[in-house]
Amino acid sequence: MDRRLLRSTEYSSIANAKERITTWMIENHMPFKVQRSSTKYFAVVCKDRNCHFKISCYKRKTGVVRIQTFHKTHNCDHTVWGKIRGPTSAWTANAAKSLFMDVPKATPAHIRSYCRHHYGINVEYTVAWRACKKLANATEADFASSYNMLQPYMEKLKQSMPGTVAIVENHEGVYTRAFLCLKPCQDSFSHMLPFLSFDACHIRNRYGGVILMATLMDGSKQIFPLALATAPVENGQHWQWFIEKCIEAVPTLQWARIAVMTDREKGLGNAVQSLLPEAAHGFCVKHIEKNVKTRFKGINTELMWNAAKTINESEFVQEMESIRCHHEEFHQYLSAIRPSAWATCAFPLPRFGHITSNISESMNNWMDEVRNLSHFDIFKSMVQKIGVMMFERRTKYNNVTTNLIPTVLNRVNKAIEMGRKMRIINYSEIIFEVEEMDTKICRNINLQNLECSCGYFQEYCLPCKHTAAVVIDKGLNIENYCCPAYFTAELKAAYHGVVIPVDVSKLKPIQLLPPSIVPRVGRPKKLRIKSRSEYDPESRLICSMCNKIGHNKRTCSRREKLAMATTTNLS
């Protein structure tokens, strides 16, 4: 610390020197009082008039501020110091500025903890509260001015990458919503798996709102952002607008036979059905489970997950019958939801093993740090993250020489190895029956329609062990029966585009007012009440009577049966 305050140390201004001297005094827990403070001179001394301690600085004619006096040793009695002067709200606000950038809604408690951890000092609550207000006002001013950079930034993106769809909408000069789909992302669409997920996450800055996301998945099961937008709220109107802009950016999306995964947000479902008529719309099973646990307290949803995951239709019927035997109302609730929306065996298009919107949740996690920024910084940071991601994946797969992606090739080789142990019965050139020698289970294969009665071939667009047995026995090329997105050439083409950054320093601001903030009535909640399904598996309720997860002994369904049996025995 002393090296920052050597006599030869120079600063650009008196304010900067004052901040450094004050910080050094506070960190070293030294008592001081300001002897003189002006635009050209600043000095601090000890509280004891007889003490030789003194630090002063002055502004030279060249404009440089230099430490003039630095007597850091006290020769006074420490007992006369009394209460040591603590930090001011201005100093605390400046010290906690980096904290407010990471946590825009930081509280005085956060600031006190931050100063204690980084500077080893205790800040009074009232000082931290004033510092919090100063930081909030400064941050609001910065966020408000950042909207002026949004329109020129979008225009510059369209110039640097022709074909990019970048839109900023306003109402009477007040920002409403914005959309962005980069040209490299548009070009990658045709090289991805035909699986798309829509979801939204909340923006955590002062002006709030939501980020609407369209997420794809490549042949290596890696997530990829197709488009994003910011809107005031998540509703049917904004989802309709967002999907329309996605179609404008990628015209082939409108009539593509693609699986679309969403939650059960009614407005989003209506928008998908009206704007993507050829798409197969499915619901996230995790969201269905949350609704089930809200409606039926303490119910075990394991059978529902088994029914959703099974690829074979007969097994699905068996699982649904098991649900009916355990809980009639639960069975009626699931039956009211069309099976083609949540059950894998009834879904008309392949979902590649995804029965939840996990790829959207992974995307939300990937962009978690961006959600604290201003709307302008959200788009700027996302452009940077997409550009870096495409470069890293392009570099990663440039040296791959196999026709199939390595992870896919391992799955195919495993299927071939298991298929060699099966017996094949020919019915025609395209229809076969395959018998597993160990289990004696028979599966029917139709090579022309790319179908296997086990369901794996249709679900993953990849030969199963039964199909592999037929293909190898007939001497056919198994790669001809794999989805195009599983090939290395398609994966390289998906990340061939280059994102060109924009020099923000050369942009000329265009006035755009931030959205108005409507204060909510009542005290804001610190934490929302979580449902049982959101807690960690280790902390879930486990019944001591039946050892099942999701309820306790008091709400167990077996309790009544045991009570009745006990009563019968006693009688």
Image (cartoon, grey):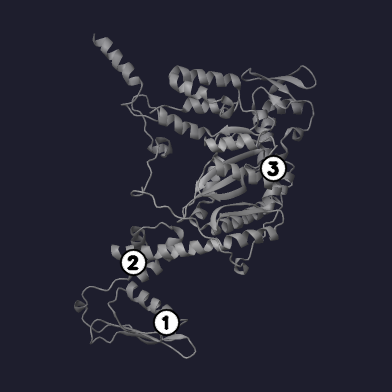
Q: Closer to us: mark 2 or mark 1?
A: 1
Q: Which residue is mark 2?
A: 120
Cα–Cα span, label 2 and label 3: 53 Å
For discs 1 and 3, the disc positioned in front in the rendered view = 1
- Residue sitting at 66 percent across and 61 percent down? 156
- Checking the image for residue 405, the label placed there is 3
Query: Front-most of 117 and 125?
Result: 125
Residue depicted at 30% across the width and 13% down the height: 565
Q: Residues within 10 Å of mark 1 (few under 14, many from 20)?
A: many
Q: Which residue is mark 1?
A: 14
Q: Earlier in the sequence, mark 1 or mark 3?
A: 1
Q: Residue at x 67, y 50 (%)?
A: 185
User: Separation of disc 1 and disc 3 at Cα?
Assistant: 62 Å
- Above or below, 354 against 563 in this view is below
**Are the two marked residues, 2 and 3, in contact with CB atoms closer than 8 angstroms?**
no
Q: Toward which corner of the image does residue 537 lie, by quadrant?
A: top left
The percent position of residue 325, horizontal first and vertical second, equals 45, 17
Q: Quadrant of the C terminus?
A: top left
Nearer to me, 349 or 550:
349
In this view, the residue farthest toward the bottom is 61
The amino acid pointed to by label 2 is Gly
Which residue is nearer to you in this view: 85 or 464?
Answer: 85
Depth check, mark 2 against mark 3: the one in front is 2
Left or right of 504? Residue 159 is: right
Tag 3: residue type?
A: Ile
Quadrant location of the N terminus in the rendered image: bottom left
Few, some or many residues within 10 Å of mark 2 (<14, 14–19, 20+): some
Classify mark 3: helix, strand or loop: loop
- Front residue of 395 and 243: 243
The residue tagged with tag 1: helix, strand or loop? helix
Question: Left or right of 255: which side holds 214?
Answer: left
